[in-house]
Image (cartoon, rainbow, N blue to C red):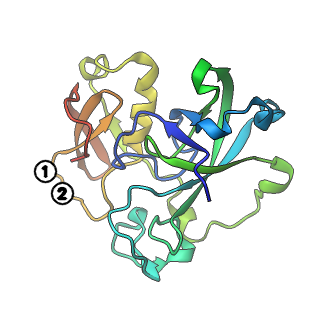
């Protein structure tokens, strides 16, 4: 398979990337590789409200897979079969995400780029294919969600002081609040005294979590975009 495009957004590291697509209205741009910057390849796509992204987990720290994994939302202590989860550690590290198509624009040498909302991909993730979402066949409201259904409404209460929120551009504040509400910590870390941090856009966000209460304690311009904390 060939990489057809890469996504660009405010997540330079995996830390704090939404756990599923559609949970947070993250805004991303999809830029096609030069070979695929052909307008005719996108003809008709503007008529769809949502699209599927098929992509590669390119930043994995290990290259092996196991038959069971520990889903973060179950606290990192309960093992489930890998095929009953969306863990990146799979026989083939391929991801599938449904995102909202906000629009397309002509960006000169970059060709036509796609603007999407709700992606759960980190910056520079390689995209292998794009397909339209068809609600009459892809949507199944009656479907059961297994153990994932028990935590689908999970959210923390976020304390985000106004003076700190003011440091973040207004158009990014609700996205950041949504990311925090979904609890970006690794599933096995529950220390109420520990200060956690991650990079979002041009900022380093630091916070604490006590029970279901998350408190933002510091926001500063990021000097290093290499890793979450």
Task: Residue 76: tell me if it is visible.
Answer: yes
Relative horizontal placement of residue 223, taking residue 188 as reference (left or right): left
Locate residue 112, reporting x and y percent. 66, 26
Q: Residue at x 36, y 49 (%)?
A: 14
Locate residue 47, reporting x and y percent. 82, 32
Circle 1 packing at 10 Å, graded few (<14), some (14-19), many (20+), is few
Q: Residue at x 34, y 45 (%)?
A: 13
Locate residue 80, reporting x and y percent. 47, 78
Q: Quadrant of residue 110?
A: top right
Q: Is residue 112 above or below residue 82?
A: above
- Residue identifier under label 2: 191
Residue farthest to the front, as pictured:
35
Q: Is residue 41 above or below residue 187?
A: above
Count of numbered tags: 2
Q: Residue at x 77, y 37 (%)?
A: 41
Residue farthest to the left, as pictured:
193
Between 185 and 7, the one lying in front of the other is: 7
Q: Secondary structure at mark 1?
A: loop
Between 140 and 134, the one lying in front of the other is: 134
Please report contact status of discs 1 and 2: CB closer than 8 Å, yes or no: yes
Q: Residue at x 50, y 60 (%)?
A: 151
Between 42 and 205, the one lying in front of the other is: 42
- Residue identifier under label 1: 193
Circle 2 packing at 10 Å, graded few (<14), some (14-19), many (20+), is few
Locate residue 146, reporting x and y percent. 60, 71
Label 1, label 2: how many angstroms apart (C-alpha)?
A: 5 Å
Relative horizontal placement of residue 12, taking residue 140 as reference (left or right): left
Q: Quadrant of residue 1?
A: bottom right
Q: Is residue 177 above or below residue 61?
A: above
């Amino acid at each position: 398979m060939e990489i057809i495009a890469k996504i660009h957004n405010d997540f330079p590291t995996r830390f704090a990337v939404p756990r599923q697509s559609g949970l947070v209205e993250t805004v991303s741009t999809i830029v096609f590789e030069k070979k695929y910057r052909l307008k005719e390849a996108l003809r008709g796509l503007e008529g769809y409200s949502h699209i599927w992204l098929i992509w590669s987990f390119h930043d994995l720290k290990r290259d092996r897979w196991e038959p069971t994994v520990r889903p973060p939302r179950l606290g990192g202590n309960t093992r489930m079969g890998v095929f009953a989860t969306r863990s990146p550690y799979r026989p083939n590290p391929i991801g599938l995400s449904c995102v909202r198509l906000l629009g397309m624009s002509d960006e000169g040498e970059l060709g036509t780029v796609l603007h999407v909302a709700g992606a759960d991909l980190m910056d520079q993730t390689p995209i292998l294919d794009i397909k339209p979402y068809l609600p009459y066949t892809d949507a199944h409201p009656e479907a059961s969600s297994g153990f994932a259904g028990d935590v689908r409404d999970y959210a923390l209460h976020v304390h985000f002081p106004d003076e700190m929120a003011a440091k973040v551009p207004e158009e990014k504040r609700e996205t950041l609040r949504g990311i925090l509400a979904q609890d970006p910590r690794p599933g096995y870390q529950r220390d109420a005294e520990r200060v956690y941090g991650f990079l979002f856009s041009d900022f380093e966000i630091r916070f604490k979590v006590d029970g279901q209460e998350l408190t933002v304690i510091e926001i500063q311009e990021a000097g290093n975009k290499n890793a979450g904390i």
